[in-house]
Image (cartoon, helix red, strand yellow):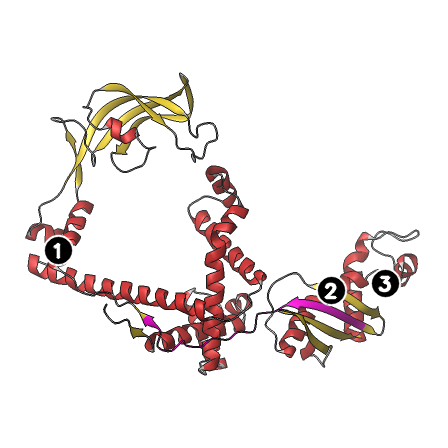
């Protein structure tokens, strides 16, 4: 950091100019500024040609004589000011928000550099009545009926498809079909396939398609009439009435295994039905507890968001939307799809995706601010030791070098995560169950 080296950066003043906006006047000494100018010269000189010199070999003094003494100043300022702004904000006790910075150069010469910048900062916050928040308790009871439903689900997962020959297709069956779509009597793109396994009643195809396949027998060839929805992704097909020529090759249904001790031994480490049911009950009880805790936390989070008093800058919400879109993009790439392809397929755009994320992003920002304020009020701040321990924990989790983790995640962000977790735990511990009506 600039200010850590013999005060090369000096914060001259810090003044609030509007809500969440501060003006900082920053001075950078002559030695630091001239060193930055020289660095730019060495980087840019290779692109410059002067008469009598090979390209990149012209002396700095001659270049400055030809193009002006300040020819390298602008790039030197660009190199210096981002770090200088971060240092100045830290000295002023301001939490910067990533946003456009208004920069004005008040002085730039051999005696040094003076910058005036206007930056966006995190808002002043207040919160009260966060102790004793009421939440709706969830029932943790696991009934025999719940056990039976779980067993039925497990039987379905272990079922097999068998061919049906003595009846027509029904909802729940898998119909193996050829289909060809016709719009005004002509085939359309993407409207045909062969030996397609369609689960009737699944809602996989457009409304009306699966209902009209049901009731037919294997070997039937028939035509169905359907209309594409008005919001269908293809402009050529939305709202259009079409026909599909269908050939039904085969009907399959799921055959469930019998629930007995043989089945229990196949799917678990237990030998008897009673042991297996007891284990299912324990697991369902644990799942209910986790779900109940999640619902409690969500209910408390919504209340905290409503209790926060702050004028949140839009830049914070925009930054959170950016993070959410980045995460969505990473999840898509893990499936072999990029955002551009996703947008082309769905008809969405980044702006539309951002709109869908906006309210959720705003809630996440407000919740984070509320929890940090509670951490401050309750003395739950993270110590340097806490932060270092968290870095080591993350390094172990991701099998990475600690220094690499530190280069990616700032200490302030680590501290914020620790404090938010502590604050949420504090609020949950002090929450009370709503009385039964």
Residue 313, quarter of picture: bottom right
Q: What is the residue that sits farthest to the front in this orientation? A: 437
Give yes or no for contact between labels 2 and 1 (Cβ–Cβ under 8 Å). Answer: no
**Rendered-image quadrant of the N terminus:** bottom right
Separation of disc 3 and disc 1 at Cα?
81 Å
Give yes or no for contact between labels 2 and 3 (Cβ–Cβ under 8 Å). Answer: no
Q: Residue sitting at 26 percent across and 27 percent down?
A: 212
Q: Residue sitting at 27 percent across and 33 percent down?
A: 198
Circle 2: is it few (<14), some (14-19), or many (20+) Cα within 10 Å? some
Secondary element at tag 3: loop
For this view, does 44 lie left or right of residue 202? right
Residue, disc 3: 70
Residue 361 visible in this rendered orientation of the protein:
yes
Residue 137, quarter of picture: bottom left
Circle 3: is it few (<14), some (14-19), or many (20+) Cα within 10 Å? some
- Magenta region includes residue 115: yes
First in residue order: circle 2 vs circle 1: 2
Position in image of residue 31 (x %, y %): 79, 75
Separation of disc 2 and disc 1 at Cα?
67 Å
For this view, does 293 lie left or right of residue 334? left
Q: Residue sitting at 90 percent across and 63 percent down?
A: 61
Q: Residue sitting at 50 percent across and 71 percent down?
A: 309
First in residue order: circle 2 vs circle 3: 3
Q: Residue 103 carries which label?
A: 2
Closest to the camera, between mark 3 and mark 1, is 1
Residue, disc 1: 145
């Amino acid at each position: 950091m600039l200010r850590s080296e013999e005060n090369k950066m000096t914060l001259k003043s810090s003044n609030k100019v509007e809500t969440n906006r501060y003006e900082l006047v920053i001075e950078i000494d002559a030695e630091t500024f001239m060193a930055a100018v020289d660095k730019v010269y060495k980087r840019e000189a290779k692109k410059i040609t002067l008469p009598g010199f090979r390209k990149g070999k012209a002396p700095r003094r001659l270049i400055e004589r030809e193009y002006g003494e300040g020819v390298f100043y602008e790039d030197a300022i660009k190199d210096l000011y981002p770090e200088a702004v971060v240092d100045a904000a830290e000295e002023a006790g301001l939490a910067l928000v990533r946003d456009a910075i208004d920069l004005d150069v008040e002085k730039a010469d051999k005696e040094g550099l003076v910058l005036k910048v206007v930056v966006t900062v995190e808002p002043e916050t207040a919160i009260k009545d966060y102790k004793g928040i009421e939440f709706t308790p969830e029932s943790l009871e696991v009934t025999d009926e719940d056990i039976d439903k779980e067993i039925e689900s497990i039987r379905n997962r272990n079922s097999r498809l068998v061919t049906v020959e003595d009846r027509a297709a029904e909802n729940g069956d898998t119909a193996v079909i050829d289909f060809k779509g016709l719009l005004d009597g002509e085939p359309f793109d993407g409207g045909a396939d062969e030996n397609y396994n369609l689960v009737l009643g699944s809602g996989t195809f457009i409304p009306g398609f699966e209902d009209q396949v049901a009731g037919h027998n294997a070997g039937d060839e028939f035509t169905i009439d359907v209309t594409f929805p008005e919001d269908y992704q293809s402009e050529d097909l939305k709202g259009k009435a079409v026909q599909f020529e269908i050939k039904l090759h085969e009907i399959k249904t799921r055959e469930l295994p019998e629930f007995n001790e043989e089945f229990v031994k196949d799917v678990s480490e237990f030998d008897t039905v009673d042991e297996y049911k007891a284990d299912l009950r324990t697991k369902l009880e644990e799942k209910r507890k986790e779900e109940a805790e999640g619902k409690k936390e969500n209910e408390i989070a919504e209340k905290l968001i409503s209790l926060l008093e702050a004028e949140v800058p839009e830049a914070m919400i925009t930054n959170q939307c950016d993070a959410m879109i980045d995460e969505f993009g990473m999840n898509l790439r893990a499936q072999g799809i990029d955002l551009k392809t996703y947008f082309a397929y769905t008809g969405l755009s980044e702006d539309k995706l951002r709109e869908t994320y906006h309210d959720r992003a705003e809630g996440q920002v407000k919740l984070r601010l509320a929890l940090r304020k509670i951490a401050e009020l309750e003395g739950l701040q993270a110590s340097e030791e806490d932060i270092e321990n968290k870095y080591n924990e993350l390094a172990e989790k991701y099998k990475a070098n600690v220094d690499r983790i530190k280069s990616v995640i700032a200490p302030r962000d680590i501290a914020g995560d620790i404090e938010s977790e502590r604050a949420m735990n504090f609020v949950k511990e002090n929450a009370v169950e709503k009385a039964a009506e």
